Image (cartoon, helix red, strand yellow):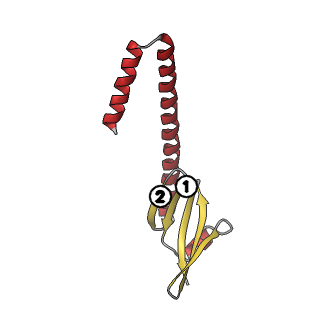
């Protein structure tokens, strides 16, 4: 990936040196647009990671064990171990999300939102 980026940058510099003023202006605008998009993606990722840090600190502080953290473009999810305490902790804020069968066991997935992060746990019945 880095080699490809450096090749693109080298080609852009060559075009800047060899091109017409209009071509150089268009290339500069394209480079600025790419840089703005990169900065926006980095800002979004930084915001997500800050939210995960706050939510994880909160959960660890109240004694909840974290099983997995998932960060992607659409959602940030922390999966935690199920305890009866979760329903009291998230009273009024938690909701049922999904249900599936594993043999004779019904598995229900619950979630709550804290610090912009979806906190999920599964209950087996």
Mark number, residue 70: 2
Name the quadrant of the C terminus: bottom right
Name the quadrant of the N terminus: top left
Q: Which residue, as the protein is rendered here, is positioned at the far right?
A: 92
From this view, report whether residue 100 is shown above or below residue 118. Answer: below
Identify which residue, 2 or 55, lies in the foreground: 2
Residue on which disc 1 sits? 75
Identify which residue is drawn at 47% across, 21% down: 27
Q: Pointer 1 and pointer 2: residues touching (CB < 8 Å)?
A: yes
Picture coordinates of residue 124 (x, y %)? 53, 81
From this view, report whether residue 27 is shown above or below residue 106. Answer: above
Mark 2, secondary structure of its residue? strand
Q: How many C-alpha atoms fall within 10 Å of the one at disc 2: few (<14), some, or many (≥20)?
A: few
Q: Which residue, as the protein is rendered here, is positioned at the far left?
A: 3
From this view, report whether residue 90 is shown above or below residue 104. Answer: above
Q: How many C-alpha atoms fall within 10 Å of the one at disc 1: few (<14), some, or many (≥20)?
A: few
Identify which residue is drawn at 48% across, 35% down: 38
Identify which residue is drawn at 52% across, 59% down: 77
Measure how far apart labels 1 and 2 are at the Cα level. 8 Å
Identify which residue, 2 or 111, lies in the foreground: 2
Residue 17 image-quadrant placement: top left
Please state if 56 lies on the left or on the right of 94 as rendered: left
Q: Which residue, as the protein is rendered here, is positioned at the far top?
A: 21
């Amino acid at each position: 990936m880095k080699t490809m980026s450096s090749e693109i940058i080298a080609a852009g510099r060559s075009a800047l040196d060899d091109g017409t003023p209009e071509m150089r202006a268009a290339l500069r605008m394209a480079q600025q647009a790419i840089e703005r998009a990169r900065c926006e993606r980095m800002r979004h990722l930084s915001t997500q990671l800050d939210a995960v840090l706050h939510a994880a600190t909160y959960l660890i502080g109240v004694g909840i064990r974290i099983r997995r953290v998932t960060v992607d473009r659409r959602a940030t999810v922390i999966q935690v171990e199920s305890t009866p305490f979760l329903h009291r902790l998230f009273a009024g804020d938690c909701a049922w999300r999904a249900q599936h069968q594993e043999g004779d066991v019904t598995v229900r997935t619950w979630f709550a939102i804290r610090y912009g992060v979806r906190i999920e746990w599964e209950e087996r019945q």
